[in-house]
Amino acid sequence: MSTLRVATWNIQAIRGASDERLAAIAAALAAHRPDVVLLQEVSSRADTFDRLAALLAHTGLAYSHFGGRDADRIVRRDRRKRYGNVVASRWPLTPVTWTPAPPWPQLIAAADIEVPGHRVRVVSVHAPNAAGNGWDKVRTLEALRAGLLEKSGPCIVAGDFNEPRTFAPAPLSFRARADGSTDGGWTDRFGETHPRSRWQAAVTGVLGDGAPVALATTLAGVEPQPTHVIRVGEPRFFDHVLVSPPVSVEGLTYDHEVRLCLEPLSDHSIVVASLALPAVASARSDRVGAVDTPYGRIVWRDGPLTDGTRITLERHGEAARDLLLGSLIGHTNGAVLRFLP
């Protein structure tokens, strides 16, 4: 079974950050030993991403994608958001253009990551707050759901959703009334009016039962914890990890210290999920065998050939090396399996 740790964090760096603060952010993430990191509110100015990417690479996250490269050029309602989201990984990744695009395209950053033996789509999300963006929050969640419905296979979605108000007894949006009803409409600061039920549907369409991805807290049997606090001191359940099959969840933890310490690094907590993917193995069932591959001649004497089988890798002109198949799968991102019928 392939395992990976995924961390998501809104680092509150929409105006950039000093080298010292970025170093502290990278160190706080490294303490959780993540394989994949999803970040939000990363400034497009002052080389913030480039400096942060270098620090993340030093901790083993050598590959990264920033969705905010063109943020300065994107104008909506005479406004710009000069920040975006990041996906960073210890394995190679390929950036993905999200369709349909949300109102602010840089707030959904996606990449396909070559996890050993699997190609996994990873999506970093930042749904804009309602106070300043009104119905654009709903459009972002609707675009996220629509794109997820178009993609099959393993998927991991995480980020700052700015929703819901509460999870008790189910995800209740900020436009639902206290009793859960959604009758009537709501008008945002731009004068745009739509039914409250549309807002609630957008939230449950991503965070509720029947969504294309499932909350890691639900799958791990963990109660959601507040990850942000507004000025009046009311806790907010904003940051989440969600997955689709065949990804499974082994555990989930919260790091609140990064926002509650004497010198907070952000106004959001870090959420870390321990995830698993199905084992990668050859269909070869013989206990003793050998096969030639582009990576050398693989010999095993204690099959069947699967994850954990000790093999010998023989290359022309090189001494034979004893290793586990799992490490070879990892080194070739599963490509070696094509040569093991």
Image (cartoon, rainbow, N blue to C red):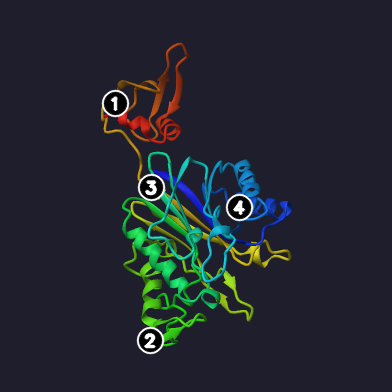
Under circle 4, the secondary element is helix
The quadrant where residue 292 appears = top left
Q: Residue 239: x and y, percent? A: 51, 65
Task: Give amino acid for label 1.
Answer: Arg
Q: Which mark is residue 29?
A: 4
Look at the numbered discs 1 and 2 and tell me whether their residues touch, using CB distance below 8 Å. no
Q: Is residue 108 visible?
A: yes
Query: Callout 2 environment at 10 Å: few (<14), some (14 to 19), or many (20+)?
Result: few
Which residue is at a point 64% across and 51% down the rendered structure image? 26
Q: Of marks 3 and 4, which one's residue comes earlier in the chain?
A: 4
Amino acid found under the numbered disc labelled 3: Leu
In 3D space, how far apart are the residues under numbered discs 2 and 4 (Cα atoms)? 40 Å
The foreground one among 90 and 281 is 90
Q: Residues within 10 Å of mark 3 (few under 14, many from 20)?
A: many
Q: Quadrant of the N terminus?
A: top left
Between disc 2 and disc 4, the foreground one is 2
Residue 211: x and y in percent read 34, 65
Label at residue 181: 2
C-alpha distance separating marks 2 and 3: 39 Å
* Side of 128 relative to 100 (left or right): right
Q: CA distance from mark 1 to mark 4?
A: 43 Å
Q: Nearer the viewer, residue 215 or 72?
A: 72
The reply to whether the C-beta atoms of the residues labelled 3 and 1 are less than 8 Å apart is no
Whichever of labels 2 and 4 marks the residue nearer the N terminus, that label is: 4
